[in-house]
Amino acid sequence: MAKAKRQATWAFFGEELKARREARGLTQQELGERVFVSGGYIGLFELGIRKPQLDVAQRIDEVLQTGGFFERACLNLIDASPYASYFEPVVELEALATKICEFAPTVMPGLLQTAEYARAVTLAANPFVTEAYVEEKVTARLDRARILKAATRPEYWVIVHENALLTPVGGPAVMAAQLEHVAALARERAVLVMVLPRAAGAHASMAGSLKLMEFEDAPPTGYTETAFSGTLLDDPAVVKRAQRAYDLLRAAAKSPEASLALIESAAEDYRRCASTT
């Protein structure tokens, strides 16, 4: 219900933006250039697909001379969310994507995490938080993963660095269950998983994780994330560079068949270790 309400408000924002832009005689590209985003980004606002960002809304008010209307509308869109502000738009885009390509350099991607693994990751980064906070984060992560069970689920490609298999997040039992979960999804063809071996050395996305999303009626979008922040990539030239980086990662990764065998072997090792402790 909350999501539907937010998207309805986004649609209102988009309708008003289109009407006031056209009243000024500007194209999406022209407005985008004046507020320092792409024309495609303006189009996503107008379609109600992308959540407006406050700094962009403020620049739109300046260009269209709307007396703070879009800033106020944007502020009214900000509500409680279990996600970091920079990640909230990504969650909405994941649900709309027809294809997602992801690279995870250190931990399993959120869409593939089990509850126990997500809990361990959350506590590692937030050792002094309340149990309610942890449960909120874990529940939100599992809710995101529902798109992989939907009839309209996206085509999902994942490249996982071997480090994510070798780091015992949560202990052997948690890791065994996590890797068994990933293997099961791969066998169900809900995800195509490839492992980037440590022996590959330097790779094309050394700075952090990378996610690429394609849509039915919108330009592709990228997202990069480091430990404390994330960045949406909507400039076509930048997205093209990110796609090339993903292609290089895929070329260096093991085949899906070899990757699945490696994941299953690691799961078996963790399971054996858990049974002896």
Image (cartoon, helix red, strand yellow):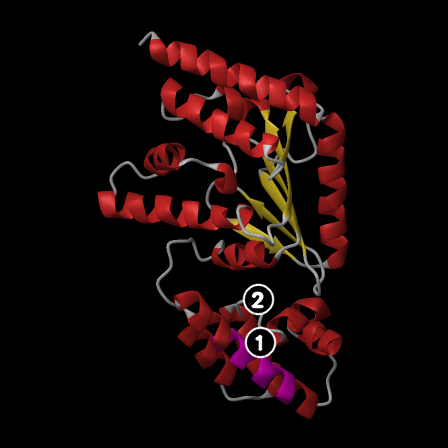
For disc 2, the neighbor class at 10 Å (few under 14, some 14 to 19, many from 20) is many
Q: Which residues are magenta?
A: 9-19
The residue type indicated by label 1 comes to: Arg
Q: Which residue is mark 1?
A: 59
Q: Earlier in the sequence, mark 1 or mark 2?
A: 2
Q: Quadrant of the N terminus?
A: bottom left
For the residues marked 1 and 2, what is the alpha-carbon distance in whole angstroms?
16 Å
Q: Residue 64 in the image: state x and y as whole percent.
A: 61, 86
Task: Note whether 158 is above or below 270 in the view shown.
Answer: below
Q: Secondary structure at mark 2?
A: loop
At x 47%, y 75%, the residue is 74
- Left or right, residue 234 beside residue 165: right
Q: Which mark is residue 50?
A: 2
Question: Which residue is at 41% across, 53% downward?
Answer: 83
Mark number, residue 74: none
Q: Secondary structure at mark 1?
A: helix
